Amino acid sequence: MKLAEALCVRADLQKRIMQIEDRLKSVVKIQEGDEPDEDADNHFLRNRYFCY
């Protein structure tokens, strides 16, 4: 049962990482001089624990 649980956690984390990447890409793709919808630095700091 532990393997199945670990695979579920892994799938959830991979999904979350993909969502974060998509959100960060949308912040990066703004025209010069415009303000992004989200602060990329703040978003990264809130989600940095996924990198460890």
Image: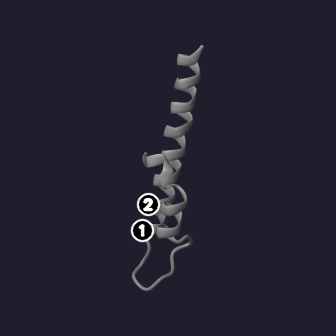
Residue name at image x 42 percent, y 68 percent: 29
Residue 46 tag number: none
Residue name at image x 57 percent, y 27 percent: 8
| Residue 39 coordinates in the image, percent (x, y) | 52, 72
Note whether 21 is above or below 42 in the view shown: above
Task: Identify the amino acid type marked 2.
Answer: Lys
Q: Which residue lies furthest to the top in this view?
A: 1
Near mark 2 (Cα within 10 A), the count class, few <14, some 14-19 or many ≥20, is few
> How many angstroms separate mark 2 from mark 1 (CA)?
6 Å
Residue name at image x 53 percent, y 17 percent: 3
Tell me whether circle 2 and circle 1 mark residues in contact (CB < 8 Å).
yes
Q: Is mark 2 on a helix, strand or loop?
A: helix
| Residue 43 coordinates in the image, percent (x, y) | 53, 63
Task: Identify the amino acid type marked 1.
Answer: Lys
Check disc 2 and report the residue beneath it.
25
| Residue 52 coordinates in the image, percent (x, y) | 43, 45
| Residue 25 coordinates in the image, percent (x, y) | 44, 60
Check disc 1 and report the residue beneath it.
29
